[in-house]
Image (tube, rainbow, N blue to C red):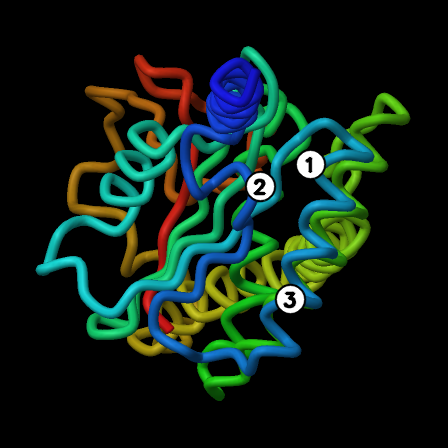
Amino acid sequence: MNKMIAACIALLFLTLLLALPASAAEFELVADWVGVLSDDEYWELNDLAQEISERYQCEISVLVIDDMDEDDAYEFARYVFEEHDYGYGKDKSGLMLFISMAERDCALVAHGYGNTAFTDHGKDVLLDRVLLPLLAKDNYYAAFLAYFSKATEFLEMAKNGAPFDVDTDEVYQQEVAKGGFWGKLAIVIFVPLAIAGLVCFVFLRQMKTAVPQRTADHYIPDGGFVLTQRSDMFLFRTETRTTIEEKKSGGTTTDSGGYSGTKRKF
């Protein structure tokens, strides 16, 4: 009887062991291998990452390492994402923030639904406006909190059918509108003034050799005036140019493995 009970317990233990996650990525979404976070910060951020990932079924993670041996930050992060089984569900949906302390490199890597919720423009904004100002000051806890907050905002927008992108970025649209206004103002005011000034300058140059004449005899050669050739000559040309604003395209560009991402120095 005792052997039977022991065998049942062993079988139960083996079943539970096999049911555990296959990698640390499935239960340690904030992997701080350097120690930039305190214990309280570490567990708080892990709970937050888990809650967001479960709510939107898109894994939001952070990985901080000491050194990647001068590898490319995006390629290294992509390799870790794939090899260590990051991502939520069958399509491995997720977004990883990768940081290498020695090189002060950071990268964002997205896969699956992460490519939808985090467009190319969205990832750039997430790094440039949210993360880099805090990472540059070595304020990692605040940077990760801001990262999770903005990621939640982007996921909610995607859930409602309007992912954060060029056309839904109010800050970017205001910058484009402002740039377009000043460009049009310059065309309307300064270009005509420049043309008028050039024309006046040309006429002024032509009048420098003028000498008053009381009769027209000076202009008529001996024997009278004979017209042998006639041609039309354009002395001036007015050219109007209109600035064509370059529009940034939206969406997400993925590689052959279905990954997208961007990288920066901080």
Q: Which residue is mark 1?
A: 165
| Residue 26 visible, this angle | yes
* Residue 13: percent from left, percent from top: 52, 27
- Disc 1 crowd rating (10 Å Cα; few below 14, some 14-19, many 20+) is many
Q: Which residue is mark 2?
A: 121
Viewer-side label of 3, 2: 3
**For residue 9, side relative to residue 78 (left or right):** right
**Above or below, 103 relative to 95:** below
Report the residue at 35% width, 34% height from top. Answer: 84
Q: Dots 1 and 2: beta carbons under 8 Å? A: yes
Report the residue at 34% width, 78% height from top. Answer: 208
* Nearest to N terminus: mark 1 or mark 2: 2
Task: Answer with the quarter of the image where residue 75 lies.
Answer: top left
Q: Nearer the viewer, residue 65 or 167?
A: 65
Q: Nearer the viewer, residue 252 or 188?
A: 252
* Residue 189: percent from left, percent from top: 71, 62
Q: Nearer the viewer, residue 161 or 248?
A: 161
**Above or below, 195 relative to 256:** below
* Nearest to N terminus: mark 3 or mark 1: 3
Label 1, label 2: how many angstroms apart (C-alpha)? Answer: 6 Å
Q: Which residue is mark 3?
A: 43
| Residue 188 visible, this angle | no
Q: Secondary structure at mark 1?
A: loop
Residue at far bottom of view: 137
* Nearest to N terminus: mark 3 or mark 2: 3
